[in-house]
């Protein structure tokens, strides 16, 4: 095995998804940089991996990465793993890879499962073009709605219902897929318009939200008027931004329509 840094994908739920190459690399590396050594310990026990390990996560990467780079410069082979899936994809690992590249240290990848790609496949939504936005942030939602192709988010079960409600307000015309517990016993995919899903039993477990592309047809005046009536009564600035995001019209046009409505107050 060549010396260098190995970025190793691990299962996101089903241990049978662990690849033989991943096991081989983890067994033969000099050191494993794990997001959580206790979580990795369960995987290590299952696959008889006795390699020494060190914690490398968001809270200590800035201190640990320089030490790992020095070991790599000295000829060590280090494998980086996250708690599940691919390191550096909404998980620790990015700083370590960047530092290794800057130090001209060879970096190799051992591909493994990735939740957002699996959810995209399960959704049945167009996958020729998509944007992965990481963990959902409602403050960025109106800007996200300018992305007209498929969008993917990670979300926690504690916030999922509030997120569905936010999507119903800003992206009511776009179907969503709520994909949870991928590869696990309770794997489930729920598809529908956000407004139709606000009353569902709150999903549990690891959740990925996939948002379908925006409809290609241009909204009619009647459809835009219906949305204007729906949001009238909120502040002018907020209503204009909401209307523009939901219909695709310019903010200037949104302001004009709201002013024509005449019953929105600032």
Image (cartoon, grey):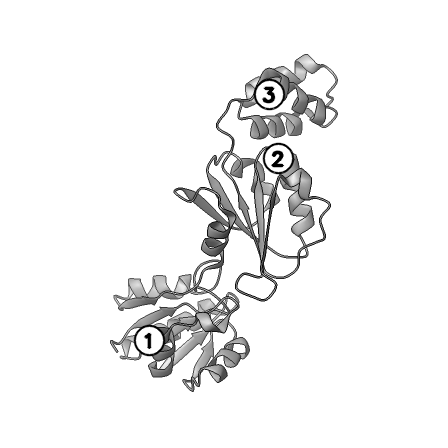
Judge left or right: residue 101 versus residue 158. left
User: Label 2 belongs to which residue?
Assistant: 170
User: Label 1 belongs to which residue?
Assistant: 70
* Percent position of residue 213, x then y: 49, 37
Give the foreground label among 3 and 1. Answer: 3
Real-space CA distance between mark 3 and mark 2, rounded to the nearest whole angstrom:
14 Å
- The answer to whether residue 212 is above or below residue 160 is above
Front residue of this view, candidates 241 and 120 = 120
Residue 115 numbered tag: none
Judge left or right: residue 122 versus residue 264. left
The reply to whether residue 66 is visible in this rendering is yes
Q: Quadrant of the N terminus?
A: bottom left
* Percent position of residue 53, x then y: 44, 81
Real-space CA distance between mark 3 and mark 1, rounded to the nearest whole angstrom:
57 Å
**Mark 2 residue crowding within 10 angstroms, few (<14) / some (14–19) / many (20+):** many
The structure residue drawn at horizontal position 40% and vertical position 70%, both measured from the top left corner, is 65
SS class of the residue under badge 1? helix
**Mark 3 residue crowding within 10 angstroms, few (<14) / some (14–19) / many (20+):** many
* Percent position of residue 211, x then y: 54, 42
Q: Earlier in the sequence, mark 3 or mark 2?
A: 2
**Mark 1 residue crowding within 10 angstroms, few (<14) / some (14–19) / many (20+):** few
- The answer to whether residue 176 is above or below residue 221 is below
The reply to whether residue 165 is visible in this rendering is no
SS class of the residue under badge 2? helix
User: Label 3 belongs to which residue?
Assistant: 254
SS class of the residue under badge 3? helix
């Amino acid at each position: 095995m060549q010396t260098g840094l190995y970025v190793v994908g691990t299962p996101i739920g089903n241990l049978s998804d662990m690849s033989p190459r991943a096991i081989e690399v983890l067994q033969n590396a000099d050191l494993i940089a794990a997001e959580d050594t206790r979580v990795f310990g369960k995987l290590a026990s299952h696959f008889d991996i006795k390699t020494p390990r060190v914690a490398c996560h968001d809270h200590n990467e800035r201190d640990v990465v320089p030490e790992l780079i020095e070991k790599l410069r000295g000829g060590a082979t280090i494998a980086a793993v996250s708690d599940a899936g691919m390191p550096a994809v909404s998980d620790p690992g990015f700083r370590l890879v960047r530092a290794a590249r800057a130090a001209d240290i060879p970096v190799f990848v051992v591909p493994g499962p990735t939740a957002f790609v699996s959810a995209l496949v399960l959704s049945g939504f167009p996958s020729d073009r998509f944007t992965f936005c990481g963990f959902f942030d409602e403050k960025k939602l109106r800007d996200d709605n300018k992305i007209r192709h498929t969008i993917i988010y990670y979300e926690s079960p504690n916030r999922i219902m509030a997120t569905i409600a936010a999507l119903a307000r800003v992206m009511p015309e776009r179907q969503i897929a709520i994909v949870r517990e991928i590869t696990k016993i309770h794997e489930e995919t729920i598809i529908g318009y956000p407004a139709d899903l606000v009353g569902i039993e709150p999903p549990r477990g690891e959740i990925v939200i996939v948002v379908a592309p925006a409809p290609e047809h241009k909204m009619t005046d009647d459809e835009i008027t219906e949305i204007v009536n729906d949001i009238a009564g909120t502040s002018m600035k907020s209503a204009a931004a909401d209307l523009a995001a939901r219909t695709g019209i310019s903010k200037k046009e949104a302001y004009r329509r709201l002013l024509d409505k005449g019953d929105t107050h600032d």
